[in-house]
Image: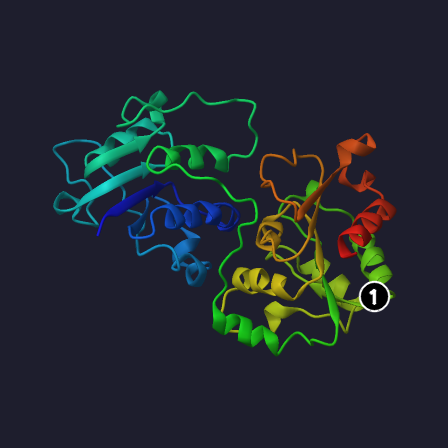
Amino acid sequence: MKSILVFSNGEKIGDGLIKLPFLYEIKKRLPDIKIYWMTNKGKTVYNDRLKNIAFQYIDEIFEQVNLQPFFWKKISNKYEFENMKFDYILDTQRVVLRTIALKRIKNNIFISSSAAGIFSSHKIPKRNETRKYYLEDLFNLLDLIKPGKIESDFKIQIPTKLIQELDSVFNKSYKYIGYAPGAGEKDKIWNIEKFIEVAKYFENQNYKSVFFFGPEDIALQNKVKNSFQDALYPEEKIDDFSGPEIVIASTQFLSCSLSNDSGVSHMLSTNNCPLIKLFGPKDSKKFTPSSPMIHTINSYDFGSKDINFIPVENVIEIMKKKLS
């Protein structure tokens, strides 16, 4: 069986979620290949919080290998890479010393855009600086191994056991809307009162509210629970899957979702239900894939970098269109 080694600098939750379509593309284009994922000094959520999803694509992970670029040292003190060879090595980062160290591992084809591609077996296309969505660079590298068409309707494959558990959490008699009112950066948070106003409007339209929170959202969570005691909080209902996996799987039960630009918004970007993402002050194009299921609302369209310039009425109208 042929093999591909994909080298990254590690993935936190947001980055790991964004890269899932890239994993899917590797598996789709090279269905009979064994996929190895490697991190240098960082860890990856693919070996932790997203393990149940990522291991549908990845066969083995080499984590925190600490590669050495110097020929008189072992490639890694943790793994015996001197005894390994891969058909393809795909370098997804651009730090030259790491690339030099990676190239010490035996391979047939080495793909890297580091140092303008001088280490690569195939010529790296000139980077188009007008592109915004950063995952496109990884797809371009993969094209050098096996060209393919990127589908905008990618859906994360959710473990069957998790879906079965959520079946007992969501009542099929109700329609649900998901809300993720938090974010890691305070200037990316739409005022919680606005989220509450939107949720109450749709509850009056017979939609049941479902809330998702990140680890830094305790204050928001307490305020929401005081206003929505009958809402669903799926992450509190299931113990044997991680929070991100539960959020991702919950999208199969939602009619629509609303989120700030946050790690949780990436979890909701599954194409299982429409997602409305609120942006300010960041650029919505950089970390939002092209998808008919994702609609972005930017504070810039209302004359400000401040996300709270986005009107509640505008959000409600767009959600109504998506729901219809």
Q: Is residue 71 above or below residue 273?
A: above
Residue under label 1, please give it: 203
Image point (29%, 21%), residue name: 118
Q: Residue at x 43, y 63 (%)?
A: 52
Locate residue 75, reporting x and y percent.
18, 40
Numbered label tally: 1
Image quadrant where one finds the C terminus: bottom right
Q: At x 60% / y 51%, what residue is drawn?
A: 269
Residue 305 % position (x, y) = 75, 32
Q: Amino acid at mark 1?
A: Glu
Q: Residues within 10 Å of mark 1 (few under 14, many from 20)?
A: some
The reply, left or right, for residue 6 in relation to residue 274 is: left
Front residue (pair 295, 16): 295
Reply above or below: 195 against 232: above
In the image, taking residue 230 as reference, residue 275 lies left or right, namely left
Instruction: Find numbered disc 1 in the image and state the secondary structure of the residue it sits on.
Output: helix
Please state which of residues 155 and 116 is positioned toward the viewer in this rendering.
Answer: 155
**In this picture, is 98 found above or below 83?**
above
Asked whether, in this view, residue 52 is left or right of residue 217, the answer is left
Locate residue 167: give its quadrant: bottom right
Dividing the picture into quadrants, the one containing residue 202 is bottom right
Q: Position of residue 41 (x, y in %)?
A: 34, 43
Residue 252 % position (x, y): 61, 64
Q: Is residue 40 visible?
A: no
